[in-house]
Structure formats: structure tokens, C-alpha cells
Image (cartoon, rainbow, N blue to C red):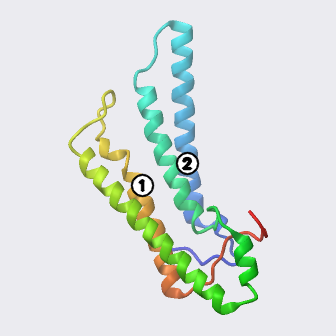
Amino acid sequence: MSAPHTPDTPVRNSGFVRTTNVLMAICLGVMALAVFVNVVLRYGFGSGVAASEELSRLLFVWMVFIGATAAYPAGEHMAFTSLLAVLQKRPKALAFMTLLIRLLVLLACGLLGRGAWQQVVVGMDSTSVVLGYPNALLPLPALLCSLSIGAMALWELIQRAPLDLGHTADVE
């Protein structure tokens, strides 16, 4: 695991974030290429690649959940910093809100993970129509994302780490 986020060692330069950025770029590049080739073939030659839509859908789902996982340690998820700015002057209230926020993140990860796991189990017995990959690959990134974010939130909870939103905006 990389070093914790501090002003001297930003999370944006960590190996985890670099790796996730590369994975997202690969997903986006393959999606763009598949759609471009399909459009050129369809309009230029009257036929397309049947697998293009399926591949793009699968890669888009993976890209979104990889990005959501990478955004958590950088504090880039939606936040209501105006309330936290008021609580900065009240350390006990801020500590309670930090605890509450982390517990709510864990609850959300648990709910997302449970639903994603149910969909993975359902998808194990079926395959995609064109490419033939197991349909469990579509909900799998949601499961992995919930496990990753849940583990990061639990670690922050155990460490009693202060709430780090990764930015200094007063209101969002």
C-alpha cells in the first residue's frame, strides 16, 4: 500500500492511482477504437462488428468502477464541505461526523457489495450473446470497487484518520 495522503505526498502520484489511470486509459482507448471501427465499417462498407457494442459496454462498466475506486483515496467523491468547514471549529463534532461518514461509507459498500455479489452469482451461469464472456464480468467491478473502498474506509476508521477530502473548497 502506498503512503498516506499528505500535502507532501499527494495520492494523485501514488502507484495505485497511476495504475488505475492506466487501466482506465486502456479501457477508454479500446472502447473508442472499437466504436470508431464499427462506425467506419457500418457507414463505409455496410457491415459492422457485432462485438463492438458488447465490448464497449463491458469496458465502460469496468472503467467507471476503476475510476470510482481510484477517486476514494484522493477524496474526489462528492462531498459537502460547507458543513465540515463549520465543524472545523468544533473538534468533537468533527470527530463524530468523521466517524459517521466512515460508517455510512462502510454501509454503502456493504449494500453495493451484497447486490453486486448476487448479480455475479446469477451471471456465472450465462454468457454474453456475441463475445461469449461470462455475464458475471459485468457486476464484478462493482463488487471489487465496494470491497476496495470498504477496506480503505475501514482502515481509515481503525487509524482514526482525519477526514481528508483532497481539496479545500468551502462549498460544493
* Between 73 and 29, the one nearer to me in the picture: 73
N-terminal label among 1 and 2: 2
Instruction: Indicate whether 149 appears above or below 126.
Output: below
Instruction: Give the left or right position of residue 102, taking residue 91 as reference.
Output: left
Residue at point 48% right, 80% down?
Answer: 155
Front residue of this view, candidates 44 and 150 = 150
- For the residue marked with disc 1, what is the amino acid? Ala
Q: Choose between 105 and 152: the one closer to the eye.
A: 105
SS of the residue under disc 2: helix
Q: Which disc number belongs to residue 142?
A: 1
Q: Residue 24 has which mark?
A: 2
- Image quarter in which the C terminus is found: bottom right
* Residue depicted at x 36% and y 52%: 140
Seen in the picture, residue 132 relative to 27 is either above or below; the reply is above
Q: Of discs 1 and 2, which sits in the foreground?
A: 1
Q: Is residue 51 above or below residue 101?
A: above
Q: Where does residue 115 sit, x and y in percent of width and height?
A: 34, 56
